[in-house]
Image: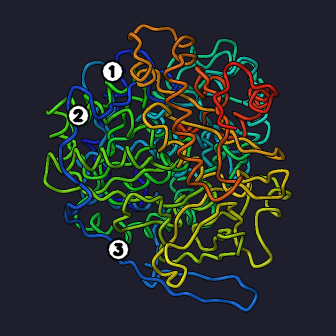
Amino acid sequence: MSCPSVANPQRRGIRLSRLASAIRCPARAIAKAPAGRSQARMTHDSAVASPAIDSSAYPTRPVRMGTKAATIERRPDGSVLVRHATEPVAVTQTWNQRLEMWATADPERVFLTEACGDTRRAWTFGEALADARAIAAALMRLPLSAERPLAILAENSIDCARITLGAMFAGVPAATISPSYALLATDFTKLAAVIASLNPGAVYVADGERYAAAVIAAVPNDIPVISGGDAVSGREMHFLADMLSTAPSPLSCEREAAVVMDDIAKILFTSGSSGTPKPVTISHRMLADNRAQNMLVFAFLQDEPPVMLDWLPWHHTFGGNNNFGFALWAGGTLHIDEGRPTPGGVAATIANLKRYPINLYMSSPSGFEVLIPHLRADPALRRAFFSKLKVMQYGGASLATYLWAEIDDLAVAETGHRILMVSGIGSTECGPTPMQSSWEQHRKPEAGLPVPGVTVKLIPFEDAFELRFAGDCVTRGYWKRPDLTAAAFDDEGFFLTGDLVKAIDPDRLEDGFLFHGRTSDNFKLTSGTWVTVLPLRLKLLSALAPVLQDAVIAGDQRDRVTAIGFPDLVAARRIAGLSEDAEAESVLGHPVLRAWIAERLRTLAAGAGGSSQRIVRVVLEAESPSLANGELTDKAAASARAVLTRRASVVDELYASPPSPRTIGID
């Protein structure tokens, strides 16, 4: 039967969907998760020289974006309330209803594509609606409910989208979990803790064979397992292929119609970059409201649907709510990128970018970094990438100025324009994007202004502001953790982000704000002086470019500021004058490289205003942060806390007297 809200489901879409499930995509190797940052940064003396132009002087390609305007309310207690001057749009549709709208209006429009052997498989909006309803009907037969969510362990795929949307149509929270907890772990302790905190009614795995060890170790025997592929031996099994042939029932249609805005749509765990991952409840209202808010910021998407290529994981809020959500909400197409921002993983991304001209590109700084040398060396890639591109956005970490300049150089050389680069501040708890820029940033880490409908509260903190949010896109709390919920909000109901911002112009707060780090990252020296980590880290990366590709600042309750550096060995070999096959140990200890770094540390220190801005020692580590060693988050950004904890002996080495042989110092 069909649910009454759509009189005639797209029958062709249903047939194609069933055919796709019957003829499985050929098995393919699953790309490994990012193992660290790029080892192949392109420098200005590389094979393709940088254009001899000042790209910063060129205009950006015309694109319609939201206005830059805000209202400012300064309060007697010193706090400031900031709101966007644009009135928000009244939101009346959930993601479920929005999917139904596009499936009715244009059932053949492509929603998602994914790799399928040597080709690509497309999934239309009509198929998506039919599949979501079929799976919702099948899920009604399992012990799932608003209190017993569906746990999902899967990489980005059409099947992952199917099961997630099916749960949302069934009124069951979809709890997507990082696959690294199951595929990279050895003892599955973190996965077991996550499963226990959820108490799920069922668990979905992309494939029973690959996830078998994790399921056996971390999922209780009485919890049913759904597989998108093979079975898990000895467990009660259900299969996605069978679910896709389930006809919607009166009960499933009734449950779909009963879903309301304040029901929980998803449970997502925070990345853990600032502590233990926390289970965030995300309502249908949050998902809908934040997409509608950001459609006012990315105004050009009201004129043309987004076309995106994206690898960012859906168990993280930026990939799963922001990027996936943009495609669903705006009737766009998201090409699922099986590539990764690593030297070995970028080849797939390059092939996909050549295949699909995009108009919106969102990635982490590491994603841009690994792509740049290929954009320089490959005219066909450069032409395809910039041909229709309107806006780029980076997130998860700050984009180094020299990388930004290289992107601008390439765009100007290809098109005569720069492409607008924007950023914002977000979190799993806030939609995920409550604050966003929509204007030229001049290569600065701008956080922007609150999106329409969000109120920002600024609390003075040293020479900056602590950032807090309120609005319909903000979570009501954490899944069955009233203790965490109570600690997450102030007495006025504003969510405590822990982020810091500085005004671009202290006299004109409506001009927006710069990201200034996190309160948890900053620390005091033994002198009592605060060290503001983010701007200092960016200065270090700029001073030691291109050798230093990442760094973590150390010095909490010490007398001086130091850093652990993660080098680009390709650039380091070149500076040292060594061959391409020189071992890392000999490269990092080479006197020429050490002298080069020391000279630049002295130059950086000469311009410092005090001890809190002087980095006096650096140790270079050949092992980069990775998901495997627990130092890299799913956003492909290093967690300073994890690095400093795991490499405590390196921190001790930085403060040893006399200095260790590895230490490069200027004190």
Instruction: Look at mark 2 in the image and give the residue it sits on.
Output: 376
Vertical placement of 322 versus 595: above or below? below
**Reading the chain from its start, which is encountered first: label 3 or label 1?**
1
126 vs 132, left or right, is left
Q: Earlier in the sequence, mark 3 or mark 2?
A: 3
Q: Callout 3: helix, strand or loop? A: loop
Amino acid type, callout 2: Arg
Give SS at disc 1: loop
Q: Residue at x 34, y 66 (%)?
A: 440
Instruction: Give the x, y percent position of residue 364.
Output: 45, 43
Q: Quadrant of residue 3?
A: bottom left
Q: Secondary structure at mark 2?
A: helix
Under mark 1, the amino acid is Ile
Q: How many marks?
A: 3
In the figure, is residue 64 to the left or right of 597?
Answer: left
Residue 585 placed where, x, y %? Answer: 57, 12
Q: Which residue is mark 1?
A: 23
Name the residue that disc number 3 marks: 66
